[in-house]
């Protein structure tokens, strides 16, 4: 959205996601470069002028959110915390703009809010360019959802008026004679160390694939007939274990929310509930 | 003038669309899948009148592509890394059948270890197969090169399949401004495929057999394919001229950027070459004259064009984003052989290997390469090839190695798993958390 808005304003643009749709459940990032001249640099922006964080639980994960951030970098976060709280927690002394997500906005709008905030903070994107970008980028979602996204975007754009243009235009990649790479000579190492093989047992238990869920199965034990564990057998991930009394228990650390159990249960005893935003990371650390 | 933001994958799909391809055998693989998804949508919406077929593997996909091309239709397909290698025997076979088609390869490093990110080892594995090979460094170039590749591949003096390479992530998923040509203009540069004797029609069925041959005959046919590839240099030059007349964009076999006068030049291909272009500009602003030589065509290898721009240079910095284990960078060796024996061949032909698995090549690394080149010119000593790796890279690897070897990870699960109680799998009978 931001890239398209900048392009509409006449800038040369380069934008890309890193593992955009390919890695649900893991931190994702996208970067945008805008310039008056042709853009020759490639890859993830090393020293961003602006970082917009859609999900503040990312600060608690090894997601590299603050990588390359300097005091001149403006940080923006969609968060219920205040800017001061977040600045103090992150030990960041630059400008941090916090925006509380509107109650009616689901977290599918966080990206839109970030694009709108970025547009305002950059100071070089007009409201109309932002709206046109949202219309074109989200057109496949249908007119109603596009209108809703646009409304939230415009509200965010207006709400951040006092921070408008606070992102400074950065310089080109510069030749700094004193900034030299720390090249090393890599020596040959014994194969036990230098082969990319990991040998271990039961490693799948270590991976909390439950973080991938967008909806969870909830067993209604008043309806559950303790059949011959159809739900447990049907679960492709062995994520339904049995308690001592034969009652099926969903292993929420590993349940990916495929909901096959809910479909297979002959007693319709399994309900489907949407996952809470951010898997409670922000609330639990409050 | 229709200038829009397109990813490299979308640009490739546009290239196929504007080339009015007839048949698209497809199989998905990261990072090219978006190409065939876009083409499938175009076919579904009747915006591209082509037959789109999914095969069960890339090996079958290339077989289907070659067979269809042998019946005289224009064929497009796409793959990457593991998929390209899975099809490897068919790449040689299809080239040996002497049929034209365009295979877009979205470069991705090869397993093992597994990566999704780009380098050029995959496309270089196809180097000797007989396929023509084009390398793009922008999304615009991807779109335009697909069209050019058909024009060259289908020429009666060539009749060889072609690979058009773009880097995964840095081009495939990255949007850049691209001018989309008008179809009527493309048709002036790329006429309909005239299959000649290579055709099949339902009312004129025929079969194609390929004989099993011995030494003399086998040699003849392989030599002819090689000569056809060499002939493609001239065919390509004509196509480039026509393309430039029509669209104003030049795609000569070797792109020379500020490379005439300086004593030192980079040689790089692919998307990272623009980083070298940036380095050239920054260094020149600081009073250090360097240039960039970027081959767009690697098969056929533009020997004369490369030799003529590199002759007389004092130092040449070859940056390989590939590694032939046990030898070194492939491009470096090819450049060396193109220069050998020439009177004014540069004495310092430096080799740097980097960018494997998508590892970034930082601006300061490119600047440092120039420092090394200047030292080499001053001292007369040429350093050995360098594998680009920093203290930070090693720290990152050591961290991962420590995690992989961590005793706590395996010890925790050597006991039988604890039974969950009170309906919460996270609480065990011992009261700890699992």
Image (cartoon, coloured by chain):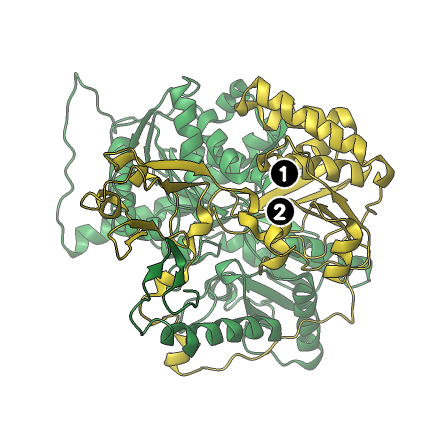
Q: Give chain B's shade.
A: green
Residue B274 shown left or right of residue A127 in the figure = left
Is the C-beta separation of discs 1 and 2 under 8 Å? Answer: yes
Q: Tell which subunit mark 1 falls on.
A: A
Can residue B152 be seen from the camera position used here? no
Residue B56 shown left or right of residue A146 in the figure = left
Residue A202's place in the image compared with A150, above or below, is below
Q: Nearer the viewer, residue A107 or B14?
A: A107
Residue B184: % across, % down = 52, 18
On-image quarter of the N terminus of chain B: top right
Q: CA distance from mark 1 to mark 2?
A: 8 Å
Q: Which mark is residue A110?
A: 1
Residue at horizontal 40 percent and vertical 34 percent from the top: B36
Residue B46: % across, % down = 40, 17
Q: Nearer the viewer, residue A83 or B346?
A: A83
Residue A127's place in the image compared with B400, above or below, is above
Q: What number of labels is visible?
A: 2
Residue B195 shown left or right of residue A4 in the figure = left
Q: Which mark is residue A55?
A: 2
Q: Earlier in the sequence, mark 1 or mark 2?
A: 2
Label 2 element class: loop
Q: Give chain A's shade.
A: yellow
């Amino acid at each position: 959205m931001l890239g398209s808005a900048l392009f509409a304003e006449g800038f040369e643009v380069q934008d890309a996601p890193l593992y955009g749709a390919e890695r649900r459940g893991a931190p994702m990032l996208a970067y945008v470069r805008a310039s008056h001249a042709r853009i020759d640099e490639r890859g993830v922006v090393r020293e961003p002028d602006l970082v917009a964080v859609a999900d503040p639980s990312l600060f608690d994960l090894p997601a590299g959110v603050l990588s390359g951030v300097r005091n001149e970098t403006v940080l923006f976060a969609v968060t219920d915390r205040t800017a001061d709280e977040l600045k103090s927690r992150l030990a960041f002394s630059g400008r941090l703009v916090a925006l509380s997500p509107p109650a009616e906005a689901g977290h599918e709008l966080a990206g839109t809010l970030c694009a709108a905030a970025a547009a305002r903070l950059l100071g070089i994107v007009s409201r109309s360019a932002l709206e046109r970008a949202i219309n074109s980028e989200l057109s496949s979602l249908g007119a109603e959802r596009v209108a809703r996204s646009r409304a939230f975007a415009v509200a965010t754009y207006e709400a951040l008026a006092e921070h408008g243009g606070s992102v400074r235009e950065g310089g080109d990649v510069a030749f700094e004679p004193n900034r030299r790479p720390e090249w090393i000579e890599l020596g040959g190492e014994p194969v036990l160390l230098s082969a990319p093989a990991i040998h271990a047992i039961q490693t799948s238990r270590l991976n909390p694939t439950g973080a991938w869920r967008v909806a969870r199965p909830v067993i209604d034990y008043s309806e559950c007939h303790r059949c011959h564990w159809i739900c447990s057998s049907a679960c492709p991930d062995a994520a339904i274990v049995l308690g001592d009394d034969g009652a099926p228990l969903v292993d929420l650390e590993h349940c990916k929310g495929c909901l096959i159990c809910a479909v297979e249960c002959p007693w319709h005893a399994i309900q489907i509930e949407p996952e809470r935003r951010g898997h409670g990371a922000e609330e639990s650390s409050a | 003038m229709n200038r829009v933001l397109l990813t490299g994958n979308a640009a490739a799909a546009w290239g196929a669309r504007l080339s009015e391809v007839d048949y698209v055998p497809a199989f998905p693989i990261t990072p090219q899948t978006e190409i065939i998804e876009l083409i499938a949508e175009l076919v579904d919406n009747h915006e591209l009148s082509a037959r789109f077929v999914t095969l069960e593997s890339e090996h079958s996909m290339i077989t289907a592509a070659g067979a269809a091309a042998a019946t005289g239709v224009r064929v497009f397909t796409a793959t990457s890394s593991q998929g390209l290698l899975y099809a490897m025997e068919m790449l040689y076979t299809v080239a040996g059948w002497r049929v034209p088609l365009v295979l877009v390869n979205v470069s991705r490093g090869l397993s093992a270890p597994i990566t999704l990110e780009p380098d050029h080892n995959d496309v270089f594995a196809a180097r000797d197969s007989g396929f023509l090979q084009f390398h793009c460094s922008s999304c615009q170039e991807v779109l335009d090169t697909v069209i050019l590749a058909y024009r060259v591949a289908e020429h009666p003096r060539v009749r060889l399949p072609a690979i058009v390479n773009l880097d995964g992530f840095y081009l495939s998923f990255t949007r850049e401004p691209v001018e989309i040509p008008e179809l009527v203009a493309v048709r002036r540069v790329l006429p309909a495929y005239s299959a000649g004797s290579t055709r099949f029609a339902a009312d004129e069925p025929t079969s194609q057999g390929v004989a099993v041959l011995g030494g003399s005959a086998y040699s003849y046919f392989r030599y002819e394919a090689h000569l056809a590839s060499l002939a493609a240099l001239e065919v390509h030059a004509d196509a480039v001229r026509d393309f430039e007349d029509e669209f104003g964009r030049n795609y000569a076999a070797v792109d020379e950027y500020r490379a005439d006068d300086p004593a030192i030049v980079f040689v790089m291909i692919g998307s990272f070459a623009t980083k070298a272009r940036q380095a050239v500009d920054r260094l020149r602003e600081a009073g250090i004259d360097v240039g960039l030589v970027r081959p767009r065509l690697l098969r056929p290898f533009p020997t004369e064009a490369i030799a003529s721009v590199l002759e007389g240079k004092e130092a040449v910095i070859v940056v390989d984003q590939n590694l032939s284990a046990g030898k070194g960078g492939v491009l470096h060796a090819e450049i060396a052989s193109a220069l050998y024996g020439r009177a004014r061949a540069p004495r310092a032909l430096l080799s740097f290997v980097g960018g494997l698995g998508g590892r970034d090549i930082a601006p300061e690394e490119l600047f440092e390469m120039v420092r090394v080149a200047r030292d080499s010119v001053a001292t007369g000593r040429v350093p050995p090839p360098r594998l680009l790796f920093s203290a930070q890279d090693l720290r990152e690897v050591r961290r991962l190695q420590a995690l992989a070897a961590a005793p706590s990870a395996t010890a925790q699960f050597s006991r039988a798993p604890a039974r969950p109680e009170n309906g919460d799998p996270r609480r065990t009978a011992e009261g700890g958390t699992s």
